[in-house]
């Protein structure tokens, strides 16, 4: 099971101009979670 980041700044996501930018930022966050596994 992947670890969740310590904190997700929702306000930062809301400040992005487009849904595409938000989607890209969320994908980056999720990839980082996947890389933080110890397995």
Image (spheres, rainbow, N blue to C red):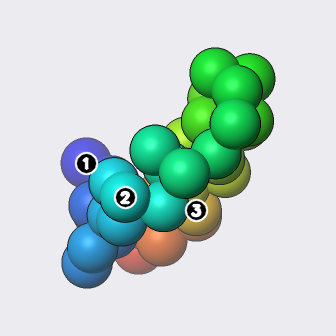
Q: Position of residue 38 (x, y in %)?
A: 41, 74
| Residue 28, above or below 37 | above
Residue placed most toward the observer, 36 or 18: 18
Of the image marks 2 and 3, the number of the one nearer the N terminus: 2
Picture residue at 48% right of the left edge, 71% below the top: 36
SS at badge 2: helix
Q: CA distance from mark 2 to mark 3?
A: 19 Å
Q: Position of residue 28 (x, y in %)?
A: 67, 51
| Residue 38, above or below 2 | below
Q: Nearer the viewer, mark 1 or mark 2?
A: 2
Q: CA distance from mark 1 to mark 2?
A: 27 Å
Residue placed most toward the observer, 33 or 6: 6
Residue 31 visible to an observer of this rendering: no
Give me the disc on residue 11: 2
SS at badge 1: loop
Q: CA distance from mark 1 to mark 3?
A: 13 Å
Residue placed most toward the observer, 14 or 38: 14
Write down the residue under mark 3.
Answer: 32
Labels 1 & 3 near each other (Cβ < 8 A) = no
Q: Position of residue 30 (x, y in %)?
A: 51, 47
Give me the disc on residue 1: 1
Give me the disc on residue 13: none
Q: Is residue 8 left or right of residue 28?
A: left
| Residue 35, above or below 21 | below
């Amino acid at each position: 099971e992947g670890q969740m980041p310590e904190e997700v700044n929702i306000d930062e996501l809301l400040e992005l101009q487009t849904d595409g930018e938000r989607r890209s930022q969320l994908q980056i966050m999720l990839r980082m979670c996947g890389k933080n596994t110890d397995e």
